[in-house]
Amino acid sequence: MSLELVREFEGEMKEFGVGHTPLKRARKLENHLGIRRLHLKLEGENPSGTHKDRMALLLALDARMKGKDTLAAVTCGNYGAALAYVCAKLDMNCQIYIPSEFAAMRNEDIRNMGGNIVIAEGDYEAALKACVKDICANSWYDANPGGTNKDLSFYSYSLIARETGQDLDRQPDWVSVPFGNGTALAGIWQGFRALSMKPRMLAYSNNNSAVRGLVSKSRDPIAVPNLSITEINEPLSGNFLLDARDGMDAVLESNGTAFEIDDQELIKASKLLSDEEGLNVLPASAGAVAAISRLESRDHIFVAVLTGRAHTHLMADLA
């Protein structure tokens, strides 16, 4: 990654309102859960409502630097909205592949922001194959996690760690992050290591092969039989994960741990955040707090990375 790209990315983050998200002390939740100290990293304050704006912006800038005007990626929704938002701002195009098996709650947002949706038959893996085939045929930029640009993806999320470390002015003891593909988890871990910090990484998910592997004390993903993907766990679930190894390594290298958290517990955590802190957070993101509550010892400084707020339309920012 060139220094020129890094400088452009960090400059454009301010212009786009991406990153530099709040780190909120959650005193009411501390009391409710019996936690010594809890901070919430509010990634839902990014323009499209999730942390994925960071990755979308860096990859779009890299694509433009390489002379490409169209990005393509597979998503269950949030990443597609982030790409559509960024590409609209940069006057670029994006091809968003949605697996037909997914509920895809953000299709309207993607279309309204100018993204072109391609419904790909089958699951995430099948959609990725269709996407990559079209990328090669059309010389588009591959904006998928786990691909040729994975190091850029990790770097974009490493800034979550940098911002957190700077705001806390010390190393947190535990950092709770949803697993998903493993991309954000790996990037945040890399960011802390770059700061010479080594918090323990706490991963969680639902119907996810990497987390199933971690909770089973395996160093490799273990496929979840009869995988159940719902509207609640879509951002977290899958047996085919693009950055599974990197995400698992983050947990293992940090001496962290992982939990499987079902839909009902995710919903309960979302309601708890609303009741105690007045925050409207996606259940899949609220699981970061539920995971912390699972730990036996709570006499630590915790950071819960809340990766997304509840879905809203954000077209005003494009006006």
Image: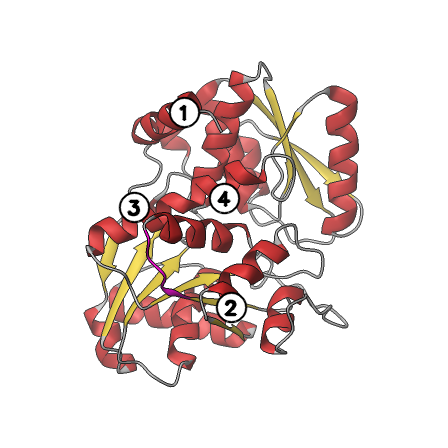
Q: Which residues are magenta?
A: 196-200
Q: What amino acid is at disc 3?
A: Thr
Residue under label 2, please give it: 204
Q: Is residue 302 left or right of residue 6?
A: left
In the rendered image, residue 52, in percent from the top left (x then y), is placed at 47, 43
Q: Secondary structure at mark 3?
A: loop
- On residue 3, the disc is 1
Residue under label 4, please give it: 154
The first of marks 4 and 3 along the sequence is 3
Residue 130 visible in image: yes
Q: What amino acid is at disc 2?
A: Tyr
Cα gap from disc 4 to disc 2, whole angstroms = 19 Å
Residue under label 3, please give it: 21
Q: Residue at x 48, y 70 (%)?
A: 266
Q: Secondary structure at mark 2?
A: strand
Do the numbered discs 4 and 1 sit on residues whose CB atoms are within 8 Å? no
The first of marks 4 and 1 along the sequence is 1
Q: Nearer the viewer, residue 193 or 97?
A: 193
